[in-house]
Amino acid sequence: MSITARKIVLKAGMKDKNKKAIFILQLSEGRLKIVKYVRHLNTQTRITGVSLLEAPSWQEIGPALAKEGFSSNEVKIALPRNQATCRFLKLPAKDPQELEKISGLQAGLYLPYPAEDLVTAYQLIQTDKHGFSMIVLTICHKNAIANYLDLFSDKAKHAQLSIILSSYGLCNLFYHLQPEENATVLLVDMDEQQAELVIVSRAKVIFSRSARIDKGLSGWGAALTTEITKTKDAFVKEGEGGQIGKIVILAAKDLRQEDIAKIGEEGGLPVEYLNYAERLHLKEAETSLCLKYSFAGLLGLAIKDLPDSLNILPGALKEAKLKLRRRKEMVVPALLISGIFFAFFLGMARNLENKKIYLQRLEKQLSGITGEAKPLEDIEKRFRIIADNSRKKDSPLAILYELHHIMPVHASLINLSYEEGRLVVLRGETTDINDVFNLVPAMEKSPAFARFNIKIRFATRRKTQSGEVIDFEIVCAR
């Protein structure tokens, strides 16, 4: 059975003697969902099982996986959207390592927890010619993934554990089934008591949120319509612009045709109903299961592998995985070096001149490795300084970030003087004197200025060719 250019063969219960199965799990609303598949070199995916375990305890999950054939297989976790926070950010970096570190520093600005209690992941949307990157940052508390890490701690040496937000699975699934879609689309996925609403464009997630909607209550279709409207409004407010072209509702049991029509009427957008289980040719029992409980995010993660940047793991575990991958990547160079040494000894047996030649080659390779390592060491040193400064609530980075958000529209910051822990002086200009008086209360409410006494030193008018301008100076002292 083929679906578009990439194939998914779904024959539950079939075994592949040459491939290990990969497990995708999600613990949501007290149920453990399991999708098991194997991936072939030609990108063909074979789904070998779709199952559900009602109300398992953490102690029951291990035996349940063993029953499904789990031993040392790779495991992916589809983290429910309601267990994470997502933000659209513009960061002054392009290098993946820099983006990883800066996004980690930004996490504390959005959740009221210490930075060491948060874990992050990000999706790169695009970069511009000025060196800035637009990303969607995923943040969650380490407690949200702690049980998964404990559950698979003894398998860490055998399986590459990945924890990825379910929104990215929905995106994968949609573009697999509709690869030619060019519009910005609002995807709606329903579970028993949760709705996940994801806005996608050009095969990337650009906005997402979750909402609690109980399908056991009458009128839940109207509640879904309300949440769709809220999502559209939040996207316009927090996103980077763009218009939503249509709404696509993934398979949901008991969603009536009149509810779908009402969603389109109130939202002012065309609405499509996508029964992904039928499109993927799942068996009748599995299709029924997917209509009642959402498996869309899990199946989407089986379709295509995602970049490491989307893996929501603590920094230490990410670093360990990176080292493991580097060791694997060094196997080929190691074999090459072994071959060089073998040739070297052969040459030495023949004549001393060959020995000098091979030595020079080895020294050249070593010098090249040293040259590549030094920039990485310099980057690490710079980030240590950035991290130390960012932990202070009144650091220059935090102050500039807050001013960017609270500065009135018509006011411009001309100069900022900073004396660590003692004094901040702002000089600027505006066309409206009220901007100056509104800026001070906004600064007083900001955590970045919490430890300062804020006063207006002066606000004077002057005339320019384009009109009257007000120069002002605000002093923040301790």
Image (cartoon, grey):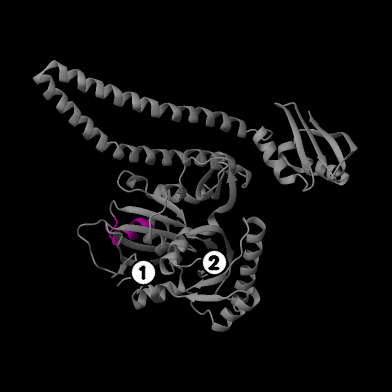
Mark sitting earlier along the chain (1/2): 1
Query: Can you identify the residue that label 1 sits on?
Result: 4
Q: Residues within 10 Å of mark 1 (few under 14, many from 20)?
A: few
Quadrant of the image occupied by residue 53: bottom left
Q: Residues within 10 Å of mark 2 (few under 14, many from 20)?
A: many
Front one among 294 and 373: 373
Residue range highlighted in magenta: 61-70
Determine the residue located farthest toward the front in the rendered image. Answer: 465
Q: Is residue 446 above or below residue 145?
A: above
Whether the magenta-drawn stretch holds residue 395 is answered as no
Q: Is residue 170 above or below residue 286?
A: above
> Residue 224, percent across and down?
60, 72
**Distance in Å between CA atoms under marks 1 and 2:** 20 Å
Quadrant of the image occupied by residue 27: bottom left
| Residue at 64%, 74% in the rendered image | 268
| Residue at 47%, 58% in the rendered image | 168
Determine the residue located farthest toward the left in the rendered image. Answer: 350
> Residue 182, percent across and down?
50, 65
Query: Can you identify the residue that label 2 sits on?
Result: 185
Q: How many marks?
A: 2
> Residue 143, percent across and down?
51, 48
> Residue 14, percent across and down?
24, 67
Quadrant where the image shows the C terminus: top right
Q: Secondary structure at mark 2?
A: strand
The chief SS type of the magenta part is helix
